[in-house]
Image: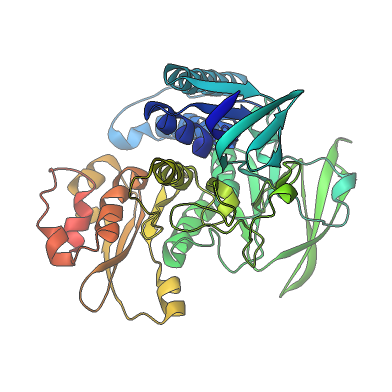
Amino acid sequence: MKYQIAIIGGGPAGYTAAETAGKAGLSVVLFEKRILGGVCLNEGCIPTKTLLYSAKTYDSARHASKYAVNVSEVSFDLPKIIARKQKVVRKLVLGVKGKLTANNVTIVNGEASIVDKNHILCGDETYECDNLLLCTGSETFIPPIPGIDTVPYWTHRDALDNKEFPRSLVVIGGGVIGMEFASFFNSLGVEVTVIEMLDEILGGMDKELSAMLRAEYAKRGIKFMLNTKVVSLDGSAGENGETQVRVNYENAEGTGFSVAEKLLMSVGRRPVTKGLGLENLNPEKTERGNIRVDGQMRTSVTGVYACGDLTGFSLLAHTAVREAEVAVHAVLGKKDCMSYRAIPGVVYTNPEIAGVGDTEEALQKKGIPYRTVKLPMAYSGRFVAENEGVNGMCKLLLAEDDTVLGAHVLGNPASEIITLAGMAVELKLTAAEWKKIVFPHPTVGEIFKEAL
């Protein structure tokens, strides 16, 4: 059978493209080798946030006395937390499938292989298409550390499904995934150590706010080792004979090791490019090996588009969703163009940290003049009312003409208010123009108006 669009990958980019194209009346076939929703829905964004909300609720109950509420006994049930996570994921996967079915999308479960730009092989059947969208996502990258094959370790997928409670955990990698799991296990009482090669956690986020978040978690007992390189791994026996993992490292102070019951590898992800038959298309690639696309997500091969992690611009679900919309609009002949000016980044720790637009470090690297406006979150009445004894920071970066270049927030609910700043960055509003917007009172989002 022939389709107007064939899509490989059923993650945020793939299912968004399929739904958008289906709504527009195009005939669509979507190939997914595992489960609809991709990494984000099944083993990333949604399940981790479900676990983190349970941990946040537990934290709130433990410290309820700060709000004049007495809670006599507080405990948690890890197997039930995991079970609830699985229930949430199942519900949302069914929702995605329902939307696609409602828009007449043909869903094919199986591993697709590209024959050429107009033919896809899956199983014993060949599917013909006018346009091809590549939305294959990314996979966990495991570095070739000596000894990695001799010790048991977790990836984020293993940590999500674990129903046993480790007493200690070493996290290799202080990025978003590493910090979110460090936050989760720290809240539940696990002794956590985070080892990071760079001089600060959360590379890419605002450095000053990242340091503030690290200081907060250091107070809660997480041990951070920055500028530290892991050189090898090996097993060791604990006091009771149980197997432990020894992480050998080196830094400016010399060499040493850290021992823990569990090891979480969280050093990053890389686009899935193998096993697809991409060599039969031979699309042009960037210096970093990502598929090169233009502003309409078109590759160098006519009729072939790439969206999501394959492009290498931003390994974030919300970026993939917007890229997918742009790609389908290009197929439909609608005028549209992808912009990466205001892609929000969020880390769902407690407190949350979020940013959009440029960071100070990025502006300095580009040589763009700017001025910084910083304001404690305590200037928001709503924040003070709901965050007893908690500090936070709002930082705005303004150009010489007062155009909003970037905004960064440490404090709950940073994830929910950062879009306000994202719109200002995307629309290139000046401080005076943004300040004319009426913010409801009292809301935490008013912190932007206070800063302006």
x and y, in percent, of residue 22 in the image: 43, 27
Relative to residue 281, is residue 248 depicted above or below? below
x and y, in percent, of residue 284 in the image: 63, 60
Image check: 297 left or right of 225?
A: left
**Residue occupying the point 31% across, 28% down:** 69
x and y, in percent, of residue 303 in the image: 54, 46
Q: Nearer the viewer, residue 87 or 14?
A: 14
x and y, in percent, of residue 62 in the image: 44, 32
Can residue 332 be seen from the camera position used here?
A: yes
Q: Quadrant of the N terminus?
A: top right
Relative to residue 67, is residue 432 depicted above or below? below
Q: Quadrant of the C terminus?
A: bottom left
Can residue 36 be seen from the camera position used here?
A: no
**Residue occupying the point 40% across, 54% down:** 338
**Residue occupying the point 41% across, 45% down:** 322
Q: Nearer the viewer, residue 138 or 351?
A: 138
